[in-house]
Structure formats: C-alpha cells, structure tokens
Image (cartoon, rainbow, N blue to C red):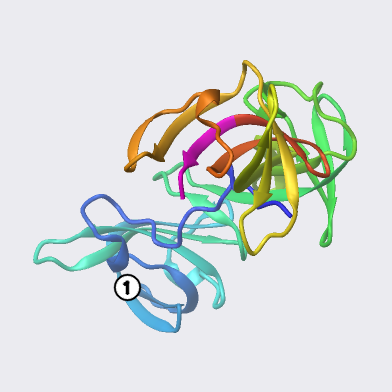
Amino acid sequence: MRLALCLGVCLLARAAASADVPADQCLGGTLLSAQASSITTKFNQKIITMPIAPGAEIWRRGVDLPSAQQLVRGDSIYLRCTQATGGTVMASLIAAVEDDDGVRMVPHHIVEIRVCGGKLIAVTKGALSVKNDQGVCVMHISANTTIWRGEIFHDTSALKLGDEITARVAVEFPRGALMAEDVEANADHWEGRITKILKNTVYIRFDAPIRGTGSVIFDRRTEFSSCAFDNDLKHNCTFADLKVGRRLDTIGLVLGKSELRATSVLGIYKH
C-alpha cells in the first residue's frame, strides 16, 4: 500500500567518475578479464575495456592489490577515472565489492557500503539484529550512527522490537563486521489525493497503482517544502494549503497499518 523509502540508504551508482570525466565514460560493471594495464567489464550488455592509469589504486574487499590481475572474474567493479594527456580516459581507482554492495570512492579511504533491512528482532546499546527473507543481519552501533524514528536519535533507546528497519552499513574488513551509519525505523513515503481534512489529520487515497486509503497526522514538528498549484506557482507550503482534491507527497513515521505521522511534506500539488 505504501512506497518504500530510500532515505539516504540507496547504493551509489555504478558509474563513479571524477569531475573531469563524464559518468558515461567511466563505467564499471562485472569483471570479465584483467590485465596488468587494463580491465574488461560488462555493464548493461555493453563490454568495455578500460586502460589503467599508472599508479592506480586497486582495492578488493579491504585489501590494496599490487596488480589488477589479482582481481577475480565476476567481481563487481566500480571505477573512478582520470583523463590522460591526449584525452584518453583511464581508471585511476578500481574497487571490487560484493554483489549488490555499493562503495564510497575516496582514494586510500575506500568504504564498501551495504543496505541492511528487515524486522527488528534484537536491540542493545551497541548492536541491532534484523530479520528478512535472506536471514538475519547484525549491525553494530557507534556514537556516529544516526538513528531516525520520527526524529533523529544517536542511541538505540527509541527503537522497538518489531520495527521495520532500513540501514546503510559500512563493511569492516577483514572481519566483515557491519557498522551502521544511518538507521531508519518505520519510515515510509506516501503519495495520494486528499479526500478529507480534520483538525490535524488529512485522509488520502493512494496514487495508482497502489490501492487503498490512509491518514496522515501533522504536528508542530512537521516540516513543509514546496507547493505547485494555482498556475504552477511554487511557494513554501503550510497546513492551510492542504485542500480536498490536491495531491500530497510526504514522508514520515508509520504509526499503524494505514496511519503515518508526517515528518516532512515534500510537496502539495494541484494535479
């Protein structure tokens, strides 16, 4: 009934290019072969051979490799590129990560990033365990972890067993431990047509193809963004801009099966 959120936990794009190289010229992909001076990858059915720049950093799951030939066929490859004299695009940074993982491509500080989500089954001050269709994911909590459950926390005190968790975690090598960077509990993204308005609650019918209705609760903590109606003029919204027939786009904390407390209104639209 609701649209899943990606609040900061979406993986980085496959093309991780430096500023002077267009993204479509610095594509990674699945490794087909590696030589001392180049690698060949496949991305969206396209086969690409990329020269390797002298002194390029080559990283595979926590280890700096002396040669691209130590990469393994089938590795998931991310690239950062530079443009050599004469215009040749070359890989200056090569990172091989687990399938479906992303990566932060900072030279000499590469971090493999993973999304960990599911139902919260255990929580302590220092760790969370969530269960999903693939099994159980255990992540560690530090003082730098940001936890969202309707508002920002820096400890696990607000979390409750049964919460639906989505987290961005950094993979620590060589142990493979998961360190949570951002954790979201019961967050969701609702869009729909307003059908009824009460004192602090708005009822919406969800946009197609999602079926059903839900209620959105507003309070003093709700932040409003932009509106687009009345000849498409945009301005900052207020609760007064919520009218029957207009479309509401909001994110917030799920309180029940069909109830959400709005944390941020992304837009109110006429159409």
What amino acid is found at the position of numbered circle 1 in the picture?
A: Met
Estimate the x, y position of residue 105 in percent, counting from the top left: 43, 49
Q: In which quarter of the image is the N terminus?
A: bottom right
Q: Along the line of sight, which residue is nearer the eye, 213 or 179?
A: 213
Tell me if residue 122 comes above or below residue 76 in the rendering: above
Q: Can residue 8 be seen in this view?
A: no
The quarter of the displayed image where residue 45 is located: bottom left
Name the outermost residue toward the top. 220
Give the main secondary structure of the magenta stretch.
strand
Residue range in magenta is 264-271
Give the camera-side residue of 154 and 204.
Answer: 204
Image coords of residue 83 (percent x, y): 19, 60
Instruction: Verify whether residue 256 appears in magenta.
Output: no
Classify residue 7 as left or right of residue 54: right
| Residue nearest the viewer, comparing 78 with 235 | 235
- Where disc 1 sits, the SS reads strand
Residue 102 in the image, given as x and y percentages of width and height: 54, 55
At x 86%, y 28%, the residue is: 124
Mark 1 = which residue? 50
As for residue 270 lying within the magenta part, the answer is yes
In this picture, residue 262 sits left or right of residue 109? right
Residue 71 visible within the image: yes
